[in-house]
Amino acid sequence: DQQVKQNSPSLSVQEGRISILNCDYTNSMFDYFLWYKKYPAEGPTFLISISSIKDKNEDGRFTVFLNKSAKHLSLHIVPSQPGDSAVYFCAASGGSSNTGKLIFGQGTTLQVKP
Amino acid sequence: DTAVSQTPKYLVTQMGNDKSIKCEQNLGHDTMYWYKQDSKKFLKIMFSYNNKELIINETVPNRFSPKSPDKAHLNLHINSLELGDSAVYFCASSPKPGYGYTFGSGTRLTVV
């Protein structure tokens, strides 16, 4: 029972173009969503987050969009750079008994070609 | 000056052995976690401690036992290792539950 899903295992884009990474969730009690970036042999690092009271959050080249009715969020990277090549994990938390547990998707590997 | 450090980074051991993975954070965080990344790449929580108190204990075999001697340390001990325990184990910490995780670089455990 995977509550957070990233259905695209990989994505390849050209440098300078937009990268769009998608994430779907099933638990309507989730109220906080995060994106993490992971390079090989390193731990995930926090990228950007969004609360369920918002539908958009922007930080530099990174924007996260949340569509609660569709239980869908996406991460936009504009413009994409070769250094953005990494695995991106979507994560969610929340609910009445929130203990701080993050539920992660399985990740999408982004390759940005020069 | 690593914020969340795990040792060892790689661990190869035989089935049936007992091993420990150590984690230390120097961020002054109150909450620490163990996550397991399996062969399908999912990151799944195993345990969480807040101020040395166990607050999350997911359905994991009782061969896995966490120990938090103080707020800055959360160790993971595994008894009677099995082939299926092979995975990457990540430690993380946060100022409070669910907020602002910082991950360690992971321990790749291989059971042969």
Image (spheres, rainbow, N blue to C red):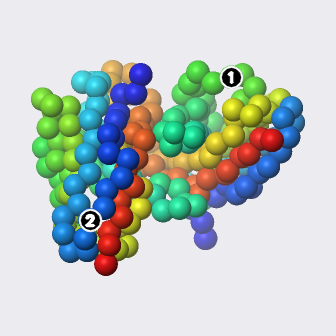
Quickly name the residue at label 2: A13
Q: Secondary structure at mark 2?
A: strand
Instruction: Locate the C terminus of chain A by quadrant.
Output: bottom left
Q: Nearer the viewer, residue A87 or B22?
A: A87
Q: CA distance from mark 1 to mark 2?
A: 41 Å
Q: Amino acid at mark 1?
A: Pro
| Residue found 14% across the figure and 37% down from its top | A67
- Can you tell which quarter of the image residue A113 is in? bottom left
In the picture, which quadrant includes the N terminus of chain A? top left
**Residue A10 visible in this rendered orientation of the protein:** yes
Q: Residue at x 28, y 41 (%)?
A: A23
Q: Quadrant of residue A42?
A: bottom right
- What's the residue at 32%, 40% (across, down)? A7
Q: Which mark is residue B61?
A: 1
Q: On what subunit does the disc labeled 2 rest?
A: A
Give neighbour class at mark 1: few <14, some 14-19, many 20+ (Cα, 10 Å): few
Count the labels in the image.
2
Query: x and y percent of residue A53 in the render?
Result: 15, 38
Q: Secondary structure at mark 1?
A: loop
Which quadrant would residue B55 be assigned to in this image?
A: top right
Residue A100 visible in image: no
Residue A104 is situated, as x and y percent measured from the top left of the image, at: 41, 39
